[in-house]
């Protein structure tokens, strides 16, 4: 008795795709679409999320032969999603498509509250407010794509350095060093003259 597509494991579906059954990838799309969109929507603008998610699945399809079956497919796909978001910002910054607008008085007042909170979770605790996302988008746009992704993964999503490293394909040490430096850059930026300049 043959397994129906809905009953196949990820391993079996992937093997079918590698063996030439491209249509089997529809099962992967159906199963992991929400998972990928959840990751992408946290890291790229809303109007770019669907296209970026599409890029994630294209990369995953092209990279399937390199997938090591000993690891979980979902985690492997998460890594591709995070790296695709990283590449999205690298491209955006390179083409200077990120607006560098000044902050409103409301944003400045919000900033004062965040800066006065010295805990590592300061941004996360204030993250439910609309100003939080707007201020962070403004500030993160002034950092490098690498700094941005580390800050979002470690400080906004609460991942450990080890977890972030696995998703980004970096060493844990690299993530720790960059997260420390990028956090200092962000605080310097947020504590300095509002709406002016960039951090190098």
Image (cartoon, rainbow, N blue to C red):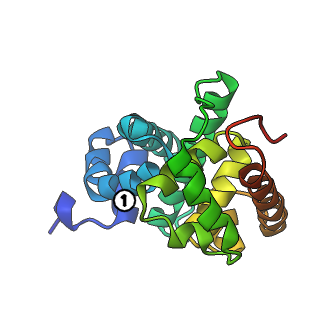
**Figure quadrant of the N terminus:** bottom left
Neighbourhood count class around disc 1 (C-alpha, 10 Å): few under 14, some 14–19, many 20 upward: some
In the rendering, at what x and y percent does residue 36 appear?
Answer: 40, 53
- Residue at 60 percent across and 42 percent down: it is 138
Q: Is residue 116 visible?
A: yes
Left or right of 15, for residue 97: right
Q: Which of the two residues, 193 or 149, is positioned nearer the viewer here? A: 193
What percent of the width, then of the height, locates residue 56? 46, 43
Identify the residue shown where x is 52% and y is 65%: 69
Report the front residue among 44 and 103: 103
Q: Is residue 167 shown to the viewer in this render?
A: no
Q: Residue at left 69%, top 43%?
A: 194
Whether 99 is drawn above or below 179: the answer is above
Residue at horizontal 32 percent and vertical 67 percent from the top = 9
Image side of residue 22 versus residue 196, left or right: left
Is residue 148 shown above or below 75? above
Relative to 147, is 98 above or below? above
For disc 1, the marked residue is: 35
Q: Which quadrant is the C terminus positioned in? A: top right
Instruction: Give the quarter of the image for residue 55.
Output: top left
Q: Position of residue 130 (x, y in %)?
A: 42, 55
């Amino acid at each position: 008795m043959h397994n129906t597509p809905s009953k196949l494991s990820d391993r079996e579906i992937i093997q079918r795709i590698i063996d030439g059954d491209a249509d089997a990838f529809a099962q992967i799309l159906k199963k992991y679409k929400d998972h990928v969109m959840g990751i992408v929507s946290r890291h790229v603008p809303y109007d770019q999320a669907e296209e970026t998610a599409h890029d994630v699945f294209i990369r995953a399809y092209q990279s399937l032969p390199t997938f090591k079956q000993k690891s979980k497919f979902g985690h492997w796909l998460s890594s591709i999603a995070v790296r695709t978001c990283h590449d999205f910002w690298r491209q955006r910054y390179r083409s200077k498509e990120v607006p560098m607008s000044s902050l409103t008085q409301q944003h400045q007042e919000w900033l004062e509250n965040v800066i006065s909170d010295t805990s590592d979770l300061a941004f996360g605790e204030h993250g439910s407010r609309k100003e939080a996302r707007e201020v962070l988008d403004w500030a993160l746009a002034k950092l490098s794509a690498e700094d941005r992704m580390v800050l979002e993964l470690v400080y906004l999503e609460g991942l450990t350095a080890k977890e972030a490293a696995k998703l980004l394909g970096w060493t844990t040490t690299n993530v720790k060093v960059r997260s420390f430096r990028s956090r200092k850059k962000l605080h310097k930026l947020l504590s300095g003259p509002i709406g002016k300049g960039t951090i190098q």
